[in-house]
Image: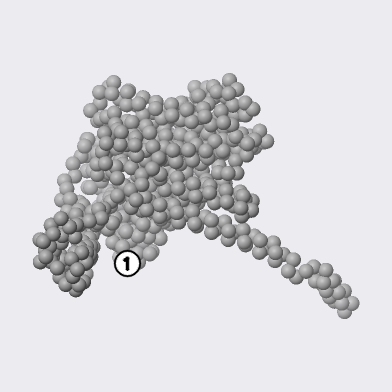
Amino acid sequence: MNNNLNITNILRNLIEETPINQNQPVKAQTSSNLSYKGVVAIIILIFYTIAEPIFKKLNFHYLHESGICMIVGMIIALISKYVGNMSDSLNNFVTFDDEMFFNIVLPPIIFSAGYNLKKRAFFKYFFYIIAFGIFGTLISFGTVSTLIHYSNKWNFFSPFKLDNKLILLFASVIASTDTVAAMTFIKEDQMPKLFSVLFGEGVLNDAVCIVLYRILSKFDFEHSVFNVWTVLSIVGSFLMMFFFSCFIGVGNGLLCSFLLKILKTVHLSRVQETSLIIFFAFLTYLITEMMHFSPIISLLFCGIFMSHYAFYNLSFQAREESSIVSKILSNIAEGFVFTYLGLTSISISHDSFSFVFLLLVFIYVLIGRFLAVYGISFILNIFKLKIFQFDVSERGITFFAGCIRGAIAFGLAISMPAEDDDSIKNKQMLISSTLILVFITTVLFGALMSPIVKFFTKGQNISRRNNQENGFNGEELKNYSLQGFDGETLTIGDIESFLNKPRNHTNKIQGLWKKIDEKILKPIFIDNYNTAREEHAQIAKEIMQLFENHEKKKLKQKAINSFNKKNGLDDDTNGVEMKESEPGNDSSTNLTNLTNFKPIEINNSSLSSK
């Protein structure tokens, strides 16, 4: 009894001495900071999302949406620092470490690149993409690392002194390009080869840089002599990791395709089908990571093979939604990195920054890119290979586009290791330099990309607009698109050619692969490939015809209302017969094009059967 009283007294004293709400202010402050960070991040991501369509509407082609994302982030950070007194919250915006970047941010970006890859164009220009995406990246990496090594040896970066591991890691980081920003100003229908080469090079460049980074980060430089054999050892490790990672990715992609083929008998819902695609993608990533290979390469090839085989076994809705979901996740991940970059841009310390290092690395990046593009072109032209036809304008644009650094470079820089005080100081300097290089190249080169493309294409129109304000000429329907096969996006004008276009093979290797693919692989991993392909195109055609009918009706009514308003007629007056009186009116032009419009009849029974 006495013991119980003693315990009761002790508890009463503890309660009386300790305020009940002691921790509430701390929790409230933490909650407030989290809410502030979340609001800031979402606002910047909204700017990132709506920037591209607004720029197209305004025909503004001097800044990419990633640049506006960084600029808005920097402005908000400056306001918070000098006005809102919230700089501490933004400096600790998020713990952006190795685990977060490689396991959360990077996988959606890489999977979307593989799953939505336009494989026809990719394999058509495969030789160019391999030349610049793999060998060009290695040349750029070797050039930058060599120049930084000798500059460091001659004490150009004093008081900073870098070891060989940090030099090679930074060279693999800064060799990562961001050609997506440049592709905004290149029209796919006018320059299909250049567009495909830049896209394919960008995908392979990211993969190669990440693999190099992972190999170098695990290499034991302390107990190894750095010489020619070291280089050969790194190259051998790269090739082995690349091959086995591809094997795991292809295997999981085929396994997912076969599973979806079997499960077609149980009629999965489109949500379940899309979920399986995402689950298999992350399963591939984790298995490869567990086996100590490159999950990035594995995930890339898994996405490519899933879109080539598993895509056919999905329902029509799941084909659309799986593509859209992967693009949404990728867009959010990229936007997050640029948001983080903009918000942390003002937190650079003068003690961890070297203007000489930044200037020299910027020059070295340009030299490395020049040797990668023009060096490869020069060597291949010596052998006079017919397969390599890359003119002066294409080389110039490719060189300039590859000078832009992006999200992958900054994410890798954040992940660089640091073990002691000197390496921590060096790492901070490298991160600051990478951040500034990404910012400068994205904003500056993005602004110059438009005149550069215009210069090399001899004044060719590079307008970002997709449609015209007056009249119906089919451009409006580009806003309506559906996912096709092989990563293609189908518009109303593409479907007939998609069904009827002959599939010619540009070389013997591609022809041999097609034979194996059509006769062996597709029958195994796809349920009724030919039927699925034709049904998909037919359903897409009927849906696009509905879009066309709707758009033409809307534009016709808009033109009639405009004509009636200009001529003082009531809105309910037809006014069609009066169109000849004022042939100069824009509205009369609209009426001439649309008055005789008749809605396309849709075969409802065919649509419902699909």
Identify residue for label 1: 267
Looking at the image, residue 378 sits to the left or right of residue 410; the answer is: left
Q: Is residue 271 above or below residue 307?
A: below
State whether residue 540 is above or below residue 292: below
Percent position of residue 282, x then y: 45, 53
Considering depth in this image, is 39 or 207 the residue closer to the camera? 39
| Residue at 50%, 24% in the rendered image | 147
Q: Position of residue 405 (x, y in %)?
A: 45, 38
In the rendered image, the quadrant that contains the N terminus is bottom right
| Residue that appears at 56% across and 28% down | 356
Which colour style is shown? one colour
Q: Residue at x 53, y 56 (%)?
A: 40
**What is the number of callouts on the image?**
1
Report whether residue 210 is seen: no
Question: What residue is shown at x 42% (from left), y 54% (from top)?
Answer: 49
**Direction bottom: furthest residue:** 1
Of residue 567 and residue 39, the one placed in the foreground of this image is 567
Q: Residue furthest right?
A: 2
Q: As rendered, which of 196 and 486 lies closer to the eye?
A: 196
Amino acid at circle 1: His
Judging depth in this view, the residue of 238 and 466 nearest the camera is 466
Mark 1 surroundings: few (<14), some (14-19) or many (≥20) residues within 10 A: few
Q: Quadrant of residue 567?
A: bottom left
Which structural element holds mark 1?
Answer: loop
Image quarter of the C terminus: bottom left
Q: Name the spot of residue 556 as percent of width and height, x first.
A: 19, 64
Q: Is residue 56 visible?
A: yes
Eyeballing the image, is 182 above or below 23? above
Q: Position of residue 98 (x, y in %)?
A: 55, 45
